[in-house]
Image: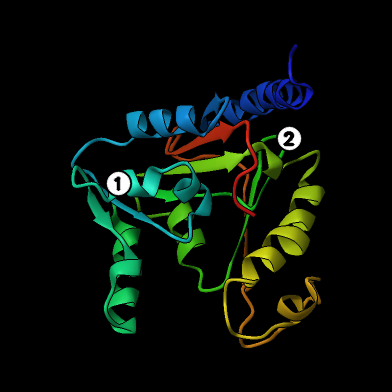
Amino acid sequence: MTDPKQEYDRKRAQVLLKNLRSRHFEAYYCEDRDQALTKALELIPKGASIGWGGALSARQIGLLDALNGGQYQAIDRDKAATPEEREKAMKRCLLADVFVTGANALSLDGQMVNIDGNGNRVAAIVYGPESVVVIAGMNKVTDTLEDAIRRARTVAAPMNKQRFPAQTPCEVTGTCADCKSDGCICNQILITRNCKPAGRIKFILVGETLGF
């Protein structure tokens, strides 16, 4: 018997793939994380320099482990010995051949929403790396752009904030308070509605729950 959730994700993905491609993105759908890992490695040339931000979805499908496996020039900020080295690694990512990221939300009409604290992740999505590979579980997909922005602000950011020690209202309550706290991770909100140059940003949609 067909799993209703898988069938639902598959059908919504077909709508989203069509709309992403109409906006000049490359876009693929994978049933599960194993297929997604295979597809991601097809899109990333061996020997390429590769950076990423938090990229929890990419970590969950095993991509970051694969990129750290020796066949790529991985720029891994988590291996930095000092805050200064970490900052330099984040800046090097802006000139990488490939940048790997997740999405905080995607609207069914093909627009991506991301929220950032320092701005390094959204900066790399906008400009710099030759190619951007986005790993996104179907749990990130919303019906409208307004829903996508709301999801990024009220679901993804408060969940993500639980990983960081600087206290904000959402860290304490789990609810967005539209704060201006020192530890705020909602300083930059990026809507990516079209891809220029065409094909630079590549989406791998995954029929699983990934990331926040």
Q: Position of residue 25 (x, y in %)?
A: 52, 33
- Say which residue label 1 marks: 67
Q: Is residue 206 left or right of residue 139?
A: left
Q: Quadrant of the N terminus?
A: top right
Query: Vertically, is 169 above or below 136?
Result: below
**Local crowd size for mark 2, using a 10 Å CA cut-off: few (<14), some (14–19), many (≥20):** many
Q: Position of residue 203 (x, y in %)?
A: 52, 36
**Residue type (three-letter) at the residue carrying disc 2:** Leu
Q: Within the image, what quadrant is residue 31 found in?
A: top right
Q: Is residue 178 left or right of residue 101?
A: right
Query: Sequence order check: which comes first, mark 1 or mark 2?
Result: 1
**Residue type (three-letter) at the residue carrying disc 1:** Leu
Regarding residue 29, the answer to whether it shows in the image is yes
> Front-most of 104 and 206?
206
Q: Which mark is residue 208?
A: none
Regarding residue 97, the answer to whether it shows in the image is no
- Residue in view at x 34 percent, y 82 percent: 83
- Residue in view at x 23 percent, y 44 percent: 48
Q: Quadrant of the C terminus?
A: bottom right
Identify the colour scheme used. Answer: rainbow
Q: Is residue 65 left or right of residue 206?
A: left
- Say which residue label 2 marks: 108
Under tag 1, what secondary structure?
Answer: helix
Q: Position of residue 29 (x, y in %)?
A: 56, 25
In space, the residues marked 1 and 2 are separated at their CA atoms by 30 Å
Under tag 2, what secondary structure?
Answer: loop
Which residue is outermost to the top? 1
Q: Nearer the viewer, mark 1 or mark 2?
A: 1
- Residue in view at x 28 percent, y 64 percent: 92
